[in-house]
Amino acid sequence: MIKPDVIPPEIGIPLALVLWAIMLAPLVRAVLQPAAGVMLMSRHHRASHHTTATHKLRPEIEARLPLPCTECGKPVYRDQKWHVAHITPASQGGRTTRANTGAAHALCNLRAGGKLGAAATNGNRRRRTDAREGIRSW
């Protein structure tokens, strides 16, 4: 055991940090690194029936570029930032297939995402607020 009075004060704090890091390394590694082959996903994505196969379709779509953007209709070129996007949104039952995917500008796709979910969430919030305040829809 190392005696505290033997270690000079100027190296005491860095040494304590090193020892602390060595002791906690296995715990940190177990928490931060998933088991082999396991992806860290949110509860929503674990429960979702949608696939994340767009990484398999990206090379096929990239070979056909320039294509029209699925959101704005302007051409998407290889040197631009682009996403594999659904033509019929997954939230409306569109599947991740070759026929239902295309290229979209990154900004167009990010801007379009989440509108249906936001409308539902905001509508529910509005109804709860109206009910709490005694406001009737009729």
Image: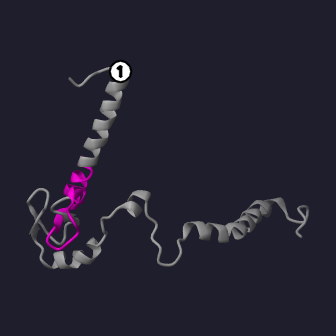
What secondary structure is marked by label 1?
Answer: helix
Q: Where is residue 126 in the image (x, y as percent from the top left)?
A: 30, 31
Q: What stretch is highlighted in magenta?
A: 90-115
Give the farthest residue toward the top: 134
Toward the viewer: 34 or 68?
A: 34
The amino acid pointed to by label 1 is: Glu
Residue lying at 25% horizontally and 53% vertically, measured from the top left: 113
Q: Position of residue 44 (x, y in %)?
A: 39, 57
State yes or no: residue 79 in magenta: no
Residue lying at 8% horizontally and 60% vertically, measured from the top left: 74
Q: Position of residue 49 (x, y in %)?
A: 32, 64
Q: Quadrant of the N terminus?
A: bottom right
Tell me if residue 110 comes above or below residue 98 in the rendering. above
Q: Where is residue 128 in the image (x, y as percent from the top left)?
A: 35, 31
Instruction: Answer with the quarter of the image where residue 87 lies.
Output: bottom left
Instruction: Report the residue marked by disc 1.
Output: 133
* Horizontal relation, residue 127 to residue 109: left or right: right
Toward the viewer: 107 or 130?
A: 130
* Horizontal relation, residue 130 to residue 18: left or right: left
Q: Quadrant of the C terminus?
A: top left
Toward the viewer: 16 or 117?
A: 117
State yes or no: residue 110 in magenta: yes
Graded by Cα atoms within 10 Å as few (under 14), some (14 to 19) or many (20 or more), the crowding at tag 1 reads few
Residue lying at 11% horizontally and 56% vertically, measured from the top left: 72
* Horizontal relation, residue 17 to residue 120: left or right: right
Toward the viewer: 43 or 84?
A: 43
Instruction: Answer with the quarter of the image where residue 6 lies.
Output: bottom right
Tell me how many marks there are.
1
Q: How is the image coloured?
A: one colour
